Image: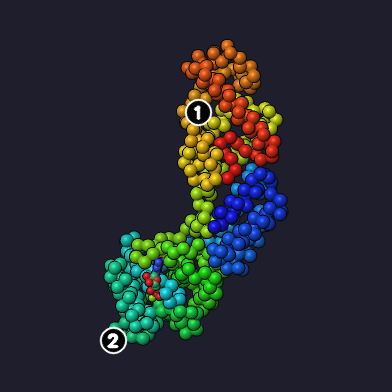
Amino acid sequence: TLSDRLAETFKNLRTKGKLSPADVDSTVREIRRALLDADVALEVVKDFTGKVRERALGDEVNKALNPAQQVVQIVNEELVQILGGTQRRLEFAKKPPTIIMLAGLQGAGKTTLAGKLAKWLAKDNHTPLLVAADLQRPNAVNQLQIVGGQAGVPVFAPEPGNGVGNPVKVAKDSIKFATDKLYDTVIIDTAGRLGVDADMMKQAADIRRAVDPDEVLFVIDAMIGQDAVATARAFQEGVDFTGVVLTKLDGDARGGAALSVASVTGRPIIFASTGETLDDFEPFYPDRMASRILDLGDVLSLIEQAQSAFDEEEARAVAEKFATDSFTLEDFLKQMQQLRNVGSIKKMMGMLPGAGGLKQQLENFDEKEIVRTEAIIQSMTKAERQNPKLLNGSRRLRIARGSGMTVTDVNSLIQRFEQASKMMKTVAKGGVPNVPGMGPI
Ligand code: GDP
Ligand code: MG
């Protein structure tokens, strides 16, 4: 997966701190390969990796505390951007009924989606009407009626002598019917063919022209892979649409189609269909799909948490102190207090693959220890905090009494401080900026 590949690439970068153009290129190469594996169209991959490369070579990465993390974040941000940025909601007409037309290839999941959408709207206090304007296949009307029955939503269908074989008339009549009967949304199911087909496009375009929908939703199977771009372009030219619905996301498709379609059409993905039953349906969230494509969800949220908890400048200053040997017990205390701010560190570490060593360390980490450390350090004089070498036996005894701890507690704290200083000094000199407890991913 992409995350495995990135992890592998980043493992090599981790020891370096800074990224060279060659590092960026090899990382971008991995991203490119992984996206192609996820069935993202080649032209989209090229465009995407171009953008990532440009940003990765720029200042934001060079100046970042952890360049590898920064690159992951850039990849994520660009993915979210292409996928539409924020979630796009369904547009409702100012004057009902709101008209929603579905278009897409046969088998894409339009009829199923019609039912899902109807049920979802009904639950949200709307009064939808389903319209059977797929008169191509003998069973299509019947299928919509079954779906309508499951959703508890009525279906407008042609009757003998009225609209049979004429989907444009059925669609038009349905709007008048909905207006008269006060249905507030009309969902028009249309016919698709197995492949892009001029007749099908014309029929859909005619329906569109006849009813002037508020939304035209292009329904596409996420498993379609590399064909997604050509299909989406054909529908955009032939019918045009206001939004996209991605179906069959319950399969093992990695979401490459989503990226391709959103990228080449510039249309937002509005819903995701995730199974055969009517409840397998949800609004589409670009950030979640980006995580799915990256397969890095938890790691990314971890990065965010860590970044908000640790001010980068502060961390840099600490790294410098380590390097120059001016790290004091006061700094140590501040670090521990910051760790507490991160909240449940153990849980965070649980989300981190490959943080084995750190995880172990944190297994032993105890919140109460922060409190004890605080008490001990606060019982020291300023001079002692600045220069732990002053801490002889009698001073340690005084501090133990003052803080309600034992001399052993005081000794163990000083020992841990010295260990941390030593370890961090090595790390800092090795050129990898770091803070205690927060290693690079
Ligand atoms: P249409 O030809 O575009 O109207 O497609 P249908 O709604 O008839 O769906 C075609 C097939 O795909 C049916 O067997 C559906 O049950 C199935 N299907 C539709 N949406 C989904 C989905 O999100 N997940 C899965 N697994 N199957 C789906
Ligand atoms: Mg259908």
Q: Mark 1 Cα within 10 Å, few/some/many (few <14, many 20+)?
A: some
Q: Which mark is residue 370?
A: 1
Tell me the quarter of the picture where residue 112 sits.
bottom left
Distance, label 1 to label 2, CA atoms, is 80 Å
Instruction: Determine the residue located farthest toward the right in the rendered image.
Output: 21
* Badge 1 element: helix
Q: Name which residue lies at 61% across and 58% down.
A: 31
Q: Nearer the viewer, residue 431 or 341?
A: 431
Instruction: Name the mark nearer the viewer: 1 or 2.
Output: 1
Amino acid found under the numbered disc labelled 1: Ile
- Regarding residue 55, the answer to whether it shows in the image is no
Residue located beneath label 2 in the image: 160
Is 276 positioned to the left or the right of 269 in the image? left
Asked if 34 appears above or below 140 in the picture, the reply is: above
* Badge 2 element: loop
Residue 417 position within the rendered picture, expressed as x and y whole percent measured from the top left: 59, 26
Instruction: Determine the residue located farthest toward the bottom in the rendered image.
Output: 161
Q: Name which residue lies at 44% across and 64% down.
A: 251
Is 5 positioned to the left or the right of 57 in the image? left
- Regarding residue 292, the answer to whether it shows in the image is yes
Q: Quadrant of the N terminus?
A: bottom right
Q: Mark 2 Cα within 10 Å, few/some/many (few <14, many 20+)?
A: few
Instruction: Determine the residue located farthest toward the top in the rendered image.
Output: 394
Amino acid found under the numbered disc labelled 2: Pro
Q: Name which residue lies at 60% across and 66% down.
A: 44
Residue 207 position within the rendered picture, expressed as x and y whole percent measured from the top left: 43, 80
Mark found first going from the N terminus, 1 or 2: 2
Residue 420 position within the rendered picture, expressed as x and y whole percent measured from the top left: 60, 30
Tell me the quarter of the picture where residue 185 sits.
bottom left
